[in-house]
C-alpha cells in the first residue's frame, strides 16, 4: 500500500501474515524484524493482527520526525561526552540505540492506539495474551527512559 506521511514523505507498506512486513520511506527500504508485531499481536484475530501491524508500520513513518529529533538529541549528548573524554563508550552507544529504538516503537504503537481508539482497547481486553501489551509498554518505556538516564548520568559522572 502506498502511503504519504502528514509531512509529505511518501512510503510503501506491505504487511503479511505472521507480522512480516516490508516498509520503505521515500523509496529507501527499512528492513527490520517483526518483533513488536509478533509479540503483542498474538491472540488477536487475523484481521486485527493485519490492521494493527499495518497501522504500527505506518506509525513509524508518521512519527519519523519525533524519532529523528530524539536520536539527534541523544547523539548530541554522546558527542558532548566524547569531547570531554571518558570510558564506557560502548555501553553509552548501546544505551543510545536502545533508547532510540524503544521510543520509536512506543510512538508507533501509540499511533495504533490513537487511530484504532476503543476498538484497540476492546481487542486487547478480549485477547487471551493480553498481558503482552502491558509488558511491551513497560519494557519499551524502561528502555527509552533508562537509556537516556545512562547517557545523562554518564555526563555528570564523567563516563
Image (spheres, grey):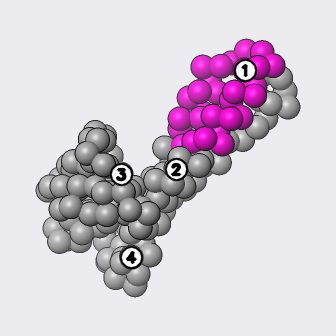
Q: Which residue is mark 3?
A: 36
Q: Main secondary structure of the magenta part?
A: helix
Q: Is residue 41 above or below residue 73?
A: below
Question: Which label's residue is closer to the chain start, 2 or 4?
Answer: 2
Q: Quadrant of residue 131?
A: bottom left
Cα distance between the residues tagged 2 and 1: 22 Å
Circles 2, 1 touching at the beta carbon (< 8 Å): no
Residue 82's label in the rendered image is 1
Q: Are marks 2 and 4 in contact (CB under 8 Å)?
A: no
Q: Residue at (29%, 41%) from the top-left corner?
A: 28
Nearest to N terminus: mark 3 or mark 2: 3
The residue wearing badge 4 is 115
Q: Earlier in the sequence, mark 1 or mark 3?
A: 3
Residue 70 at x, y percent in the picture: 60, 47
Q: Position of residue 90 (x, y in %)?
A: 60, 19
Please report the bounds of the magenta region as a residue range: 71-100
Amino acid at each position: 500500500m502506498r502511503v504519504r506521511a502528514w509531512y509529505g514523505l511518501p512510503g510503501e507498506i506491505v504487511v503479511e501474515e505472521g507480522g512480516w512486513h516490508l516498509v520503505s520511506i521515500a523509496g529507501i527500504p527499512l528492513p527490520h524484524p517483526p518483533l513488536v508485531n509478533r509479540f503483542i499481536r498474538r491472540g488477536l484475530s487475523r484481521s486485527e493482527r493485519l490492521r494493527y501491524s499495518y497501522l504500527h508500520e505506518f506509525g513509524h513513518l508518521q512519527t519519523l520526525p519525533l524519532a529523528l529529533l530524539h536520536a539527534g538529541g541523544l547523539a548530541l549528548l554522546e558527542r558532548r561526552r566524547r569531547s570531554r573524554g571518558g570510558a564506557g563508550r560502548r555501553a553509552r552507544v548501546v544505551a543510545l540505540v536502545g533508547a532510540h529504538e524503544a521510543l520509536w516503537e512506543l510512538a508507533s504503537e501509540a499511533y495504533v492506539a490513537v487511530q484504532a481508539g476503543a476498538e484497540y482497547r476492546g481487542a486487547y481486553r478480549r485477547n487471551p495474551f493480553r498481558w503482552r501489551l502491558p509488558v511491551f509498554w513497560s519494557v519499551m518505556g524502561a528502555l527509552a527512559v533508562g537509556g537516556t538516564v545512562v547517557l545523562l548520568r554518564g555526563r555528570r559522572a564523567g563516563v
